[in-house]
């Protein structure tokens, strides 16, 4: 929806609710409110901001406030990708609001997703960094890393890779890689170290975040550390999406889709709809709804605890266990399961433990890599898992007798 496009007639009785995540950082919440005000100017109808958690008003409260003034509310998601908030938590809040206000029509929209306006925005962010570094993608070897938060939903992570590929297509970058700051892999530091081996003239790190929060800060720190570690590569970071007017193009399109019943979700690859390898326990609408209800209750119980860390912050450590053919034959699956069990039994462990493809140390495994520490353990037996968790993951003490290499 372009800026020149006028809102359709007959909207005197409709409002839009822009649903953001919510943050303990009021600056991030103000960004949502600013976008809501700008979207109201674009559409010509009332647009209120609401939050899933950690900020006010909540979605149900905002809808209740609109119910007496309009007959139709369209919920538009200010979420980059479709993970559990988009698929579970907001739909639950919408359904509860429908039951509370039976005379009100409530449309539920989609996430921002992959959109041409966002690609243009990222292209401009990259160009600004190139100008800062004094490089030209047409004359120099410029690599780009699009770094997102990372999710436990494979569908959301796959869209990051799609976005990176579309940014590469038709442009003169030498390569564009997708990376993540937590939860899943590849993590930013390993992506950057891999890039260094190709010796590009410059590396542009683009934080794929809405605001300049804690996770964006980690991405910027990672880019600065990489620049200092590899003097033969110029590296710098771009700014997050912010409140760029092009986001209004995306939000306008998502509003139109929702109010006309044409919302498209990637249900064929949604872990709540189909059985995906490694995510079998998530499949089934009842499980998804139960998770959303539990999530809602957890935040209600914690809303008065100012110093409670947000449950969705990236884990402190990411542990990758090679389960490729050689390591698997040497007992890697048992090591993986024992690590996960020991982590669950620990009161201190803050780590995500996942499978990995070949780590390139065949015959020396099972291999276990701990990031961001860059410590690789070799020849790990099932009985060693408890030591890795109790020493390294719980207390940051490396299990020296198992170390294969440090990066």
Image (spheres, rainbow, N blue to C red):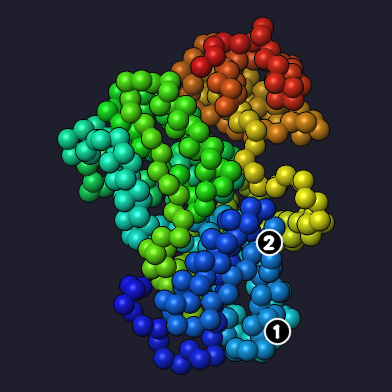
Whether the residues at callouts 1 and 2 have beta carbons within 8 Å, the answer is: no
Give residue 20's position: percent from left, percent from top: 58, 62
Mark 1 → mark 2, Cα distance in angstroms: 23 Å
At label 2, counting other C-alpha atoms closer than 10 Å, the crowd grade (few under 14, some 14-19, many 20 or more) is some
Give residue 80's position: percent from left, percent from top: 49, 56
Quadrant of residue 273 in the image? bottom right
Q: Which residue reaches farthest left?
A: 139
On residue 329, the disc is none
Position of 311 with respect to 326 (left or right) is: right
Quadrant of residue 396 in the image? top right
Quadrant housing the N terminus: bottom left
Residue at horizontal 55%, vertical 21%? 374
Position of 257 with respect to 98 (left or right) is: left
Quadrant of residue 321 in the image? top right
Which residue is the site of mark 1? Answer: 101
Q: Secondary structure at mark 1?
A: loop
Which residue is the site of mark 2? Answer: 55
Give residue 360's position: percent from left, percent from top: 46, 18
Q: Is residue 241 visible?
A: yes
Residue at horizontal 74%, vertical 60%? 296
Residue at horizontal 38%, vertical 35%? 236
């Amino acid at each position: 929806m372009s800026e020149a496009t006028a809102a359709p007639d007959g909207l005197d009785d409709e409002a839009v609710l822009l649903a953001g995540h919510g943050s303990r950082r009021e600056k991030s919440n103000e960004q949502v409110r600013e976008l809501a005000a700008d979207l109201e100017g674009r559409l010509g109808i009332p647009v209120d901001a609401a939050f899933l958690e950690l900020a006010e008003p909540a979605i149900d409260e905002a809808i209740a406030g609109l119910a007496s003034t309009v007959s139709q509310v369209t919920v538009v998601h200010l979420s980059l990708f479709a993970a559990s908030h988009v698929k579970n938590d907001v739909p639950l809040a919408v359904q509860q609001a429908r039951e509370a206000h039976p005379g009100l029509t409530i449309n539920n929209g989609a996430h921002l997703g992959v959109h041409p306006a966002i690609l243009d925005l990222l292209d401009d962010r990259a160009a600004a960094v190139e100008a800062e570094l004094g490089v030209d993608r047409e004359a120099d070897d410029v690599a780009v890393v699009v770094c997102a938060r990372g999710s436990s939903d494979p569908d959301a992570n796959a869209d990051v890779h799609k976005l990176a590929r579309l940014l590469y297509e038709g442009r003169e970058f030498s390569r564009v890689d997708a990376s993540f700051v937590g939860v899943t892999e590849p993590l930013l530091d390993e992506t950057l170290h891999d890039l260094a081996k190709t010796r590009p003239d410059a590396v542009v790190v683009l934080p794929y975040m809405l605001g300049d929060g804690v996770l964006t800060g980690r991405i910027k720190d990672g880019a600065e550390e990489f620049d200092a570690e590899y003097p033969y590569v110029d590296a710098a970071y771009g700014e997050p999406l912010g409140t760029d007017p092009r986001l209004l193009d995306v939000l306008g399109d998502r509003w139109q889709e929702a109010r006309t019943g044409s919302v498209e979700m990637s249900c064929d690859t949604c872990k709540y709809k189909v059985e995906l390898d490694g995510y079998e326990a998530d499949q089934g609408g009842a499980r998804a709804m139960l998770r959303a209800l539990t999530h809602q209750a957890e935040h209600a119980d914690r809303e008065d605890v100012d110093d409670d860390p947000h449950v969705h912050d990236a884990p402190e450590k990411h542990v990758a266990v090679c389960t490729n053919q050689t390591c698997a034959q040497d007992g890697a699956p048992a090591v993986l399961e024992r690590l996960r069990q020991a982590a669950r039994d620990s009161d201190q462990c803050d780590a995500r433990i996942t499978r990995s493809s070949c780590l390139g140390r065949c015959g020396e495994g099972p291999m276990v890599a701990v990031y961001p520490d860059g410590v690789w353990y070799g020849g790990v037996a099932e009985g060693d898992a408890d030591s890795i968790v109790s020493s390294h993951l719980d207390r940051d003490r490396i299990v020296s007798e198992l170390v294969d290499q440090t990066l």
